[in-house]
Amino acid sequence: MTAQTYMNTDADPALPILDIRDLSVSYGSGRTAKRAVHGISFTVNRGETLAIVGESGSGKTTTAQSIIGLLSGGKVDGGQIMLNGTDIAKWSDRQLDGLRGSRIGLIPQDPGTSLNPIRTIGSQLGETFRIHRYPLDKTGRKAKVLELLAKVGLSSPELRYDQYPHQLSGGMRQRVLIAMAIALEPDLIIADEPTSALDVTVQKRILDLIDVLKRETSASVLLITHDLGVAARADSIVVMQGGRVVEAGAAAQILGSPQNAYTSQLLADAPSFSDTRREHPANVPSEPADDIVVIEGLCKHFPLSGKPEGLRAVDDLSFRVARGSTHAIVGESGSGKTTTIRMVTGFEKPTSGRISISGRDISDLAGEELRQFRRTVQLVYQNPFSSLDPRQTIFRIVEEPLRNFEPLAAQERDRRVREMIARVGLPTDVLHRHPATLSGGQRQRVAIARALILQPEVVVLDEAVSALDVTVQARILALLAELQREFGLTYIFVSHDLAVVRQIADTVSVMQNGREIESGPVETVFGNPRHDYTKELVASIPAFRKPG
Amino acid sequence: MSLSKYLLSRLGQALIVLWAAFTLSFLLLQMMPGDAVLIKYMGGDFALTPEQLANIRQIYGSDNPPLQRYLSALTSTLTGDFGYSIDAGVRVTALLADNILPTFRLAGLGFLAAVVLSFTLAFLSYFSPFSWLRRVITMLPSLFVAIPVFWLGIMLIQMFSFRLRLVPVINPGPWVGLILPIATLAVPISAPIAQILMRNIDDVMTRPFVAVARAKGASLNWVFWKHVLANALLPVLTICGMLFGELLAGAVVAETVFGLNGIGRLTEAAVATLDVAVLQAVVLLSAATFVTINLVVDLLYPLLDPRLRKNAKAV
C-alpha cells in the first residue's frame, strides 16, 4: 500500500485536520541545495494520532518543522500543507505566528533544554496567553496556568508556578511543555520524539498523558518517533526513509503485516517487537563455580553537606556473573548504575563490599596493579561521538591500548589492529580516516575494537547501543553476540532500555535508588516480576505485549 | 552558605588580592634603577651635592634597607597614609583626591558609551533585514579592537576639532571637552562586549527553548526581548568586569592625548619621575576598584540567573 492509496481510501467525509500533499523540502540554496523531503503525502484525520516513523536522516523531523513553519535553514520547495482545508505552505512568518501555539501546538524532544532556564514555569506558561492577546489580566492568567499545571498531572501547581526549570525533573518539565502545547487547545499537536530523552517508566506516563489530553481537547496528534514501540500507540503510521514515504496505513496493519521490506527490517530490528532471542551459548553456566565477576555487599557513599550519612549511591549490591554470559544492570537515571560500573572498572573505590574479577579482589588495587588490571576489564561507552578522540585516526585509536600495555613491534601492532578492525566488520580503508567521517554505528564498532584489542575477559557496555538507530542497534547487538561466542567474553550490559536487555542478557539486576531490588535470569525477572518497580518497568517497555 | 558569610569570605579574598598587589608593585618599583630624588634634583642649574641628596633621602626615608621600607610603607598604607609625592611635594592622598573624580567620570562615561555602542551594534545585527549589513556589523568589533587608542584620539581631534571645528581644542567646556576622550575610550572597549554579545545572541537563538517559544506563536521580536537577550547577557557581564583593567589603561592614554587631568595623567607623570609613592597608591587604587567591580558582578549573577541562587534547591 502506498501513501497515495492510503489517502484515497480515507473514507472520512469530514475535512482532515492536516493534509500534506506532495511536500518537498530542501536545505541550502543554489548548487549546494540538498533535498531532504521528496514529495510526500499523508493525512491526519480529526481526533487521530498519526506517527511518522523513521531513522535519523529520514526527513521525519524536517516534515514536522515545515508544518509548523520553523525549518531552520530549510525551505519548502513545493506541495501543499492543508491545515483545516487551508494551504499554509506559503504563509509568511507573521501569518504563521497567529497559528503557532493557538492552532498547532508543539511538544519538543528534549525537556532539559526546551525551557528558558532563567524564567519561572508560571511566566513561561502564561506567555502563550499573552502572545495571543487573550483578554486575561494577571490573576486570570495565573488561574489559567494553575489549572493547566494541574491538568498535566503536576503536584502542587502553586509551588511549580514560581519554580524555575532546573528545579524540576525531566518528566515534570515535559509535563510543563505539554501544558504549553495544549494551553490554547490547538487542533493539531506535533510531538517530536516527546519521550526519547526520558526514562522508560516516565516515557509511558508521558505518552499516556498525551493520549488523555488528546481525547479531552479532541485534538489530533502528529507523533514523530524513531521507536516503533512508541508508534504502536498511534492509529496510523507513516514510515519514512531517505525523505520518502515507504509505507503508510493503519498501525495494526503496518505492524502486523508490513508490505515494504524496509518496514519489515525496522520491525525485525526493533527490540520491543522481536520475539527471537539470540542464541545463548552460555545460557546455562558450564559449572556453577565459574563466576568471573563476584560482587558482594557493594556500597558507595558520597559525602553530602548537611547529611551525615551522605548520599548512598550504591547500597548493598550483590550479583555474580558466569563466565561467557551477559549480565544486565537496569534502572533509571540516579539508580546507581553508573557508580556501580565505575567501581567494577576500578575508577571508583567502594566504601565497603567486595568486587572480585577473575578470582582477584580489585577493591584495593592501586597504582601499577590497577593499571594492569584494566586489561582484564574494558569499557565501551554510550556516546560513540564523544568517546573517540576526533584528532586521531582510527588506526591510532585502536592501536593505543596496545602501545600502553604490550611491548610489541610496530608490524605486529599493525597486524593486530587490522585483524581487529576486520573482525568488527569495518573495511580496511577506515584505518586512516578520522572519527568525524564515520557513522554512529561505525564509530561504535571502532570503540568495540579498541576495547577488544587487549583481549579482555570482561567488557562493560555502558548504554553502548542507546544512541543508535534501531537497525544499526540490531547489527551492533548481533556483532556483540558473535564476539562473545568467539572470544568467550563476559559482558556487563548497563541499559535503561529493557527491550534491548531482554534480547541480549542472560541475567539481570534491577536497581532503584542505589539498591538492587530484583535479580536473576532475564526470563524470570521479566516474565514474572515480583517487585512493583520491576512490574512498572516491564509494563513500560513500549508495545511489550503487542504481537510483533 | 548565607549571603553575609559569602560576602565576608569574598572580602577576605579581596584583602589578600590587595596585599599581593601592594607587595608585587613594591618589589617591582624597588627594582627600578634610579630614584625620584635623583631625577628631581640632579643636573641643571639646581644640581645638589651628594651630601644634600643623601639628606633629602633621609627625610623621605628612602635610604633605609628594603625590608624596613616595605614594612613601614605597608603599615602607613594600612592607616590610609600613602606618604608624600617627591615630585609634587604634597601628600599622595591629596593628589589622588584631586584626580580621582575626573578619571572616574571619564572611565564611567566611556564605559557607558561602550555599552551603548556595543548593544546598538548587536541590535542592528539581529534586526538587520539584509544579510550584507549583518556581515558588515559583525566585522566591526575586530576593526575596533585593532585601532590603537592614541591614534584614534589624534584622528578624532584632527577630524572634529581642526577640520569640522565642532569641538574646540582650546578651553572647551567641562563636558564638551569630554566628548572626544569618551569616544576614544569607548571604541576599543565596546569591541569585546559587542563581539561576545553578538556571538551569544546567535548561540541562544539555536537553543531549543527559543524554538519552543516560536512554536507558541512568539514573533522574532518577542523572542529576542523575552528570551534571548537575558540569556545572552550573562557572559557579557563577566567580560565587563574583566574589561575594567583595559578601561583604566585606555584612560591613561586618553588623558595624555587630550591633556585632561586625572589619575592617568598623574600616573604618566609619576612614571616619568619615578615617583614611587604615587605609583604605589595608583596600583592599590586600581586593584581595589577592580576587586570591587568584580564583586559587584558576582553579586549580580544570581539576580540574572536563578540557577546560581544558593537557596534555590530542587524539590
Image (tube, coloured by chain):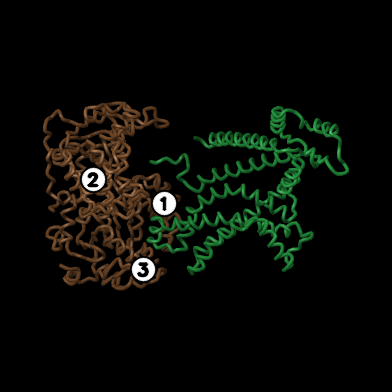
SS at mark 2 in the image: helix
Colour chosen for chain B: green
Name the one closer to the observer, A348 or B98.
A348
- For the N terminus of chain A, the image quarter is bottom left
Q: Which residue is mark 3?
A: A32
Mark-to-mark CA distance, 3 and 1: 44 Å
- Is residue A499 in sight in this rendering? no
Q: Which residue is mark 1?
A: A122
- Is residue A372 in sight in this rendering? yes
Rate crowding at label 1 as few (under 14), some (14 to 19) or many (20 or more) other CA atoms within 10 Å. Answer: many
SS at mark 1 in the image: helix
Label 3 with label 1: CB-CB less than 8 Å:
no
Give left or right: position of B3 versus A417: right
Q: Is residue B302 above or below residue A357?
A: below
Label 3 with label 2: CB-CB less than 8 Å:
no
SS at mark 3 in the image: helix
Mark earlier in primary sequence (1, 2) = 1
Q: Amino acid at mark 1?
A: Gly
Q: Which residue is mark 2?
A: A420
Rate crowding at label 3 as few (under 14), some (14 to 19) or many (20 or more) other CA atoms within 10 Å. Answer: few
Q: Closer to the camera: disc 3 or disc 2?
A: 2
- Tell which chain the image draws in brown: A
* Residue drawn where x is 68% and y is 62% of the image: B155
